Image: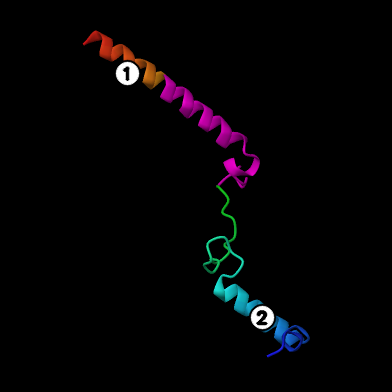
Amino acid sequence: MKMEDILGTKKGIEALTDFLQASGAFTKTGLPRGEILAPIYDAGGEEEESEESDGEGAREEEEEEEEEEGEEDSNEGSDQEEE
């Protein structure tokens, strides 16, 4: 079938759209997308702020983890000297 025939009609565009969604084409994993769910709000009615929304929280956590690892490394050295 020619591309003009597929994309030249409303029915053809809808069929192509359905195919692309069902096949997972143009997705990062190559798998079909999951169902889109409505957001869940807490009892207070406020939406929880995601760490990924601004990137700030994720960066701060990484820095804290690096600091903790640095402390553990320095403690390991002192333990070995005592033995």
Amino acid type shown at disc 2: Leu
Predominant SS along the magenta part = helix
Q: Earlier in the sequence, mark 2 or mark 1?
A: 2
Residue 50 seen anywhere in this rendered image of the structure: no
- Say if 78 sits above or below 63 in the image: above
**Does residue 45 show up magenta in the picture?**
yes
Quarter-of-image position of residue 7 = bottom right
Residue 16 tag number? 2
The stretch in magenta equals 43-70
Front-most of residues 82 and 64: 82
Residue 75 image position (x, y, % from top left) = 35, 16
Q: Residue at x 37, y 20 (%)?
A: 73
Q: Residue at x 53, y 62 (%)?
A: 29
Residue 65 image position (x, y, % from top left) = 46, 29
Q: Specify how the rendered protein is coloured.
A: rainbow
Residue 38 tag number? none
Pointer 2: residues within 10 angstroms few (<14), some, or many (20+)? some
Residue 23 seen anywhere in this rendered image of the structure: yes
The reply to whether discs 2 and 1 touch (Cβ–Cβ < 8 Å) is no
- Say if 81 sits above or below 34 in the image: above
Q: Residue at x 59, y 56 (%)?
A: 39
**Residue placed furthest toward the left:** 83
User: Which residue is under mark 1?
Assistant: 76
**Residue placed furthest toward the top:** 82
Amino acid type shown at disc 1: Glu
Quarter-of-image position of residue 1 = bottom right
